[in-house]
Amino acid sequence: MRTHRITLLSGDGIGPVLAEELAGTLELLGMRTGFQCVLERRPFGREAYLKTGTPLPEETVESIRSAEAAIVAAVDAKDVKGPTPVGLLRKKLGLFADVRPIRARPGRWSLREDLDLVVVREITQGFLSDRNLHAGSGEWMSDQDTAFSLRVVTYEASRRIAEYAFDYAERNGRRRVTALHKASIFKQTCGTFLRACRDAAAAHLGIAYEEVVADNAANGLIAHPERYDVLLTTNLFGDILSDEAAALVSSLAPSVNQGPGVRVYLPITHSPAYEDLARDCYDPVPGFLCLHMLLRDLGETEAAALLDKALDAALRRADPSASAVLAGLREDLRGGKAIVCNPMEPHQ
């Protein structure tokens, strides 16, 4: 039997509940399609910080490094002093590519039913200044009323993420890479990024390449999202624009952060939803979309297809509560078929 070693980071708020649902789903899919996952549960986030003084204990780092992949259920940065948990995770593990597929799903509101694009974001430098220095935050004050923040963009990191984006496009049947920038203002930093993107494009002539000003792309995601395929961005532009893009599909968006030999999957959410756990109104679907990505990347295509079909059925049901969605997924996966119901009314 095929065996995969996965690190499961339960995190905070709804995280422990969702993590057990993810673990149970992996077990069900493994029994149906002939694999098993050895799960290592490790601390990460606010609760880890309050207990150990760090949101990312060394045992967690080593577990992720030795596993095939890691998946985060939910994470909270509240009360965490110093780097954010996710920022620290990226820095310690050398994660450089944040890949966020944005796709409309049946049964949930989306701007267009055919919306399907991917944001590929560089996450080691740029405007998120905590990534830019060996020591220190990348921000400082010359006096009590004047603050500075450092932006770093290197050709090496830009070429690496550009190559990744073009390789991703080739592997996944994508047709175009669009580099986002503001080179008319940031002549040196965005200029360096674009030079690297153009050099990568010249090495991948089978993929169309274009350049779009980032604020024009923010407009274009609303006005004509069908024009975009793979969006290639620096750090902060990608952070903001991928959240905008996720809103166009009811925030049903997973992501994977990749580095050399390391993959960490985490849903695009901004709250661990402590209060929503009791009210049963949090959305577990982005976490399962991360699980779908993980299964595909592990080569478990049959399991990924079964989960995808069950997710579509769960989203079509009339009851959008977390408990109903989770119960429907379990029923479908145990029964071996996705149950097709009348689509629910579109909503946000």
Image (cartoon, rainbow, N blue to C red):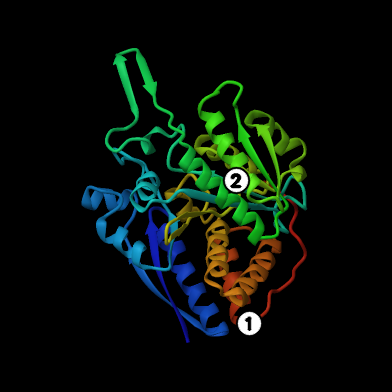
- Camera-nearest label, 1 or 2: 2
Number of marks drawn: 2
- Residue 9 in the image, given as x and y percentages of width and height: 38, 60
- Residue 307 in the image, given as x and y percentages of width and height: 61, 71
- The residue at 40%/27% (across/down) is 150
Q: Quadrant of residue 315?
A: bottom right
Q: Is residue 30 left or right of residue 85?
A: right
- The residue at 60%/42% (across/down) is 199
Question: Of the numbered discs in the image, which one, if any, rests on residue 335?
Answer: 1
Q: In what element is the residue under mark 1?
A: helix
Q: Is residue 133 left or right of residue 269?
A: left
Q: In what element is the residue under mark 2?
A: helix
Residue at the extreme bottom: 1
Tell me the amino acid under the disc marked 1: Gly
- The residue at 71%/62% (across/down) is 316
- Residue 32 in the image, given as x and y percentages of width and height: 57, 84
- Residue 131 in the image, given as x and y percentages of width and height: 38, 38
Tell me the amino acid under the disc marked 2: Ala
Mark earlier in primary sequence (1, 2): 2
Q: Is residue 7 above or below residue 257?
A: below
